[in-house]
Image: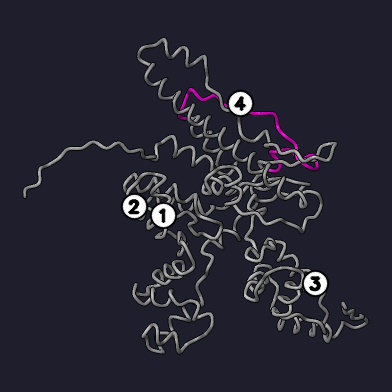
Amino acid sequence: MALKPKISLRQTQRLSLTPTLRQSLNILALPMTELITAIHDEAAENPMLKLETQHEGTFSGGRSAYDVATETVATTVSLGESLHQQITLMRLDDVVRSIAFYLIGDLDENGYLTSDTDDTVKALGLERSIVERAISAIQSCDPPGVGAKNLTECIFLQMIEAGIDDERARLIAKHLDLIAAEDWPILLRKTQLSEVEVHELVTLVRGLTPFPAARFWQEERPGSPEIRIERDASGQHRVALTSGMVPEITIDVDLLTRSKKEPGAREFAARCQARADSLISAVRFRNKTLLRISNLIVRHQHPFFSGRADHLIPLTRAEIAHQLSLHASTVGRAMAGKYLEWSGLVYPLSFFTSSTLGAESGLRTSAYSAQQMIRRLVERETADTILSDEKIVKKLNADGVDITRRTVAKYRGCMNIPSSFERRRQMTARRTRPGSPGSVNFVKQ
């Protein structure tokens, strides 16, 4: 039976990454200093843009906004800037390059890609192969491991960069749990590799990092605060954007009016006006989003802003997104590289969000609060009461903190606190170290 050809019409809705949408997302992700540069660059090319310097705001201690910026502005290239520069030099299709730039905004501070590929494909209405090529472009950048979706992929990418073939790299990266447990017999059986190969690969893995963007933490200096938190006479906290740094953007109405009267300039003026309107809209959206997120943070972290500086209530970016009816990636872009000033100190917005402990038991503790509890336990130690990680776990569990020994070890490492063995050795050395002639040794008990 022959099939007759049929012609049918189907209407679908697709969200494409238009230049306007791309600009809005890029502006949202820019830190203050990069935003100022972007505004001035656009004004240099667009005669319809009119920039006006705002009145300079003041910060705690009488410092001007300009002073704070010059003291805190980052002098090194950020992870985002580095990736932008590398991708710009790649031979990619324009669409793939645009998606790669878009996805850079979805990287967390460790360099991991937080957005789901399926969600990105659905949101942008693109073919999956295009999104995957953009992800591959990011993953081919330096530092090795950047753009990974999880630890397994992060280690795999670093092994490939180190020259390990694809098959063996996948075998080892898939069994990181066995390496951590040092279960060599099972690892040998599951990988079917020789002892020599396993030894070489495990030695390599132990020299790799689960935090590919770590060097950018070490190089990055605090940025300029764009949010200021103040307490009014009634004790309420007020959230405001800092002024005096970002110029006010308007359209030069006089020039626009004159241009429309000249036939040869009308089309050019219309294009410039559209670009100016797009930039103004993007900056307004950025400011509005920052204020909404900051207000929510201040309400949620009320104990912190009320003087309990070591206490943070668990708060995730997903929770912020849900409460503000925003996409999680929008919240991530808005918070990346943004800072607020409170009581004379500058904090990154990401400081107020953290992973949560004890979610399953219902007793939630922020990772930051747990770290401070560990620090206080260690600070109270004496030479005879050094706490092992296991003992720290038991004390925290008794206080209602659901935490494992591995997590304690991880947090201890983040705070540069040595192991119990090393702390005992250091304290013993201080007690037995001979003093200089005529001096007296004091032992802190």
Specify which label sits upstream in the sequence, 3 or 2.
2
First in sequence: mark 4 vs mark 2: 4
Residue 162 rendering spot, x and y as whole percentages = 41, 72
Q: Which residues are magenta?
A: 45-69
Please tell me whether residue 67 belongs to the stretch shown in magenta. Answer: yes
Mark 2 to mark 1 CA distance (whole Å): 8 Å
**Horizontally, is 181 left or right of 375 in the view?**
left
Tell me which residue sits at (39%, 21%) in the image: 268
As rendered, which of 149 and 434 lies closer to the eye? 149
Could you give the CA–CA distance between mark 4 and mark 3, rounded to whole angstroms?
A: 52 Å
Tag 4 residue: 52
Residue type of the residue flagged with mark 2: Arg
Residue displayed at 61% across by 45% down:
323
- Upstream in the sequence, badge 4 or badge 3? 4
Q: Residue at (80%, 85%) from the top-left corner? A: 428
Would you say the residues marked 2 and 1 are in contact, meaning their CB atoms lie under 8 Å apart? Answer: yes
Q: Is residue 339 magenta?
A: no
Within-10-Å neighbours for mark 3: few <14, some 14–19, many 20+: few
- What whole-number distance in Å separates the C-alpha atoms at marks 4 and 2? 44 Å
Tell me the mark number nearer the camera, choosing from 3 and 1.
1
Counting residues from the start of the chain, the first of labels 1 and 4 encountered is 4
- Looking at the rendered structure, the secondary structure element under dot 4 is strand
- Which of the image's four quarters has the C terminus? bottom right
Residue 207 place in picture, x, y as percent: 51, 75
> Between disc 2 and disc 1, whose residue precedes?
1
Residue at numbered disc 2: 128
Task: Place residue 334 in its image quadrant.
Answer: top right
In this figure, which residue is indicated by the disc labeled 1?
117
Query: Vertical placement of 44 versus 295: above or below?
Result: above
Identify residue for label 3: 379
Q: Give residue 315's mark.
A: none
Query: SS at mark 2?
Result: helix
